[in-house]
Image: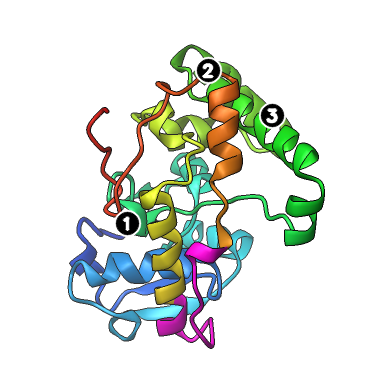
Amino acid sequence: MATAPGVSIKTVADLKGKKVTVLKGTAYQRTFDNLLATAGLTEKDVKLINMDWPTSKAAVVAGQIDATFGGSDLFLLKGQGATIALSTKGRGPDYTINSGILATEDFATQQPQLAQGLVRQLVRAAHWASQEANRDALIKLYADNSGNPELSFREELAGDNLNARYSPLLDEGFIAGYQGVLDDGVKLGLIRQPFDVKAWFQPTFVQQAVKDLQLEKQWRETDAAGKAKAAA
């Protein structure tokens, strides 16, 4: 979270009554609501404004709002007088945003070799990204392909265990994260009806890829709370 020049926000509780922007209907709204809840606050306790990211960044630098909640690109505002006041780093799976690849059931069942080959390449890429020795190259890759400066990615990854961050395992912790997204989506009115989250995942492709690449000891599975399980 970035705050405007001269605005003092040191704790989540300090957000009460402040003019804050977040892009509603996105994963960031869910994360922001969870952050507010740690101080017993809700969206009603702040002057929440629904605003897109470019406009929000301009508004916070200009002092038109008190703070804006968003992604790692907010680090770029530090040189423009804004301050990074609060962070969700290290707070657990309820504050993370994941991405994945979906396959139709027809493709997975009718073209299993193609599906397995794709997943193998993704696991190989995850293994490369998990290596601390590749941190700088990974950051450069992000910057080159996004058009954003390396600074934002360097700040985002600072202090992170890359092996844990880029684990491709579809384990209990990963699935629980999506369950939390569903539950909060229903609560926020972004999703009308719940559904069976576990039915969306087919971990056998990843498991086979890990075995094929002899990476069984590379990553540790996590439990529903996102904590690494004891080594077998």
Q: Which residue is mark 2?
A: 214
Q: Which mark is residue 6?
A: 1
Q: Find the distance from the CA under tag 3 to the CA under tag 2.
A: 13 Å
Q: Is residue 207 magenta?
A: no
Residue extent of the magenta highlight: 185-199
Q: Quadrant of residue 45?
A: bottom left
- Residue depicted at x 54% and y 70%: 23
Q: Which residue is mark 3?
A: 121
Which is more N-terminal, label 2 or label 3? 3
Q: Position of residue 65 (x, y in %)?
A: 44, 69
- Residue depicted at x 62% and y 24%: 124
Q: Amino acid at mark 1?
A: Gly
Residue 182 to residue 149: above or below = below
- Residue depicted at x 73% and y 36%: 118
**Marks 3 and 2 close (CB-CB < 8 Å):** no
Q: Position of residue 160 (x, y in %)?
A: 37, 31
Question: Tag 3's secondary structure?
Answer: helix
Left/right placement of residue 9 relative to residue 168 reads left
Depth check: 231 or 153 in front? 231
